[in-house]
Image (cartoon, grey):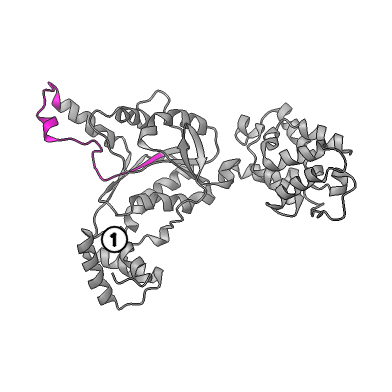
Amino acid sequence: MLRKDWSARLQGLVVFRGLLDTELLRALAAALRAEAGDTAAIAAFEAAMFVRGTDWTKVLLELVLEHENLCLKVAAGGDAGPVLEGALDSELQFLQALGTATPQELFGTMPEFMPCWLTTPDADFAAAYRTRREQAGKKGYGMFARYHVFTLEDGHLVPVQCPDPQRLSELPGYEREREKIIANTKALLDGKPANNVLLYGDAGTGKSSAVKAIANEFAPEGLRLIEVKKTQLYQIPALMDELAKNPLKFILFIDDLNFAANDDNFAALKAILEGSVGGRSHNVAVYATSNRRHLVKESMTDRAGDDLHAADTRQEMMSLAARFGLTVTFQQPDKDRYDHILLELAKQYGVQMPSDQLFIKGAAFALRAGGRSPRVAKQFVELLAAGVNA
């Protein structure tokens, strides 16, 4: 195939057209359009490729497998119909030929001073894609195949490049509380009815860490975490519609949730949890953390106001927490639980200290820090591990 034929076929992609927006394929398209002997364009393509690897076949195949192509958008991993499925097969054949082509087959004569990439001639793009498609419910596609934690910015999902690596095994002391959340998360992953979850309790008891650790633990099973700020709650219905056809499962995570009595976001979240005509998607659950059981700040002045139906107003304020099907309470640890947390964290950090001294010094540190909590215990052990006199 001549250079112009490679270029025309590449520009004619339909199902995988989004690949042309990647830096690597843009560089390839430019190199194929360039005049023969234009080493700068070829070098730019090779530089973009070698960032990902020196085997051109493997690099292109990875892009193909992770790409959110037209068939996936239309059918979410299912059959997209004869027209699109036929185009998919044809384009996979072309991409396999492209991915196994040598520098000479793509560009003709190559200068001796330029590096030649490797290829894997026996690669089967169609078989690899078929396998990945069958695993779409766990591995995902597009950015969901590369990342498992996201934030919401201007209505669009943005991947978190370096998410908190917290693991469940690193969170001692609240295993019983987390069992309920883990069971609910497994139900979500299995396609069974799953509840929205409210993690309520004292500050520093590991509510947020539990949600992040669960997201990390079950990412290989197809779980993705999306952090939503309280001021973004009105964007959730559109987000749920966007995620509804995705074969993955999603937790919408709202951290440190609380409202003022006149907060417009209060009604928005009520409608999202229950009562909206759109309903809640089967693959999405809301997990929220709060230090307040009833979520809405209320003062004695509010109770002594001129509301003729004060009891109804209070019931409305309390109804939001009731719309979470599962409420898990994280209480401040007693001495025995706090000592257990200290001991387990000391093992994790490799701190060598007699347990009686660890408990005495840990209790004194907690007293200075304002009270016992897993967060305080971790701060204390980290100082010990760093050699700082705590």
Determine if residue 130 is in view. Answer: no
Classify mark 1: helix, strand or loop. helix
Label 1 crowd (10 A; few <14 / some 14-19 / many >=20): many
Is residue 131 found left or right of 56 in the rendered image? left
Identified at 49% across, 41% down, the residue is 249
Residue at 20% over, 30% down? 315
Q: Can the viewer see residue 196? A: yes
The foreground one among 12 and 44 is 44
Q: Main secondary structure of the magenta part?
A: loop
**Relative to the observer, which residue lies in front, 32 or 37?**
37
Q: Give the x, y percent position of residue 310.
A: 14, 26
In the figure, residue 77 lies in which quadrant? top right
Q: Position of residue 39 (x, y in %)?
A: 82, 46
- State the residue position of label 1: 376
Residue segment shown in magenta: 286-310
User: Can you give x and y, in whole percent of width and height, for residue 236 in the image?
Assistant: 42, 31
Quadrant position of residue 325: top left
Tell me the residue at 62%/29% (across/down): 74
Give the amino acid type for the residue marked by disc 1 in the picture: Val
Q: Is residue 276 left or right of residue 360?
A: right
Q: Residue at x 29, y 76 (%)?
A: 355
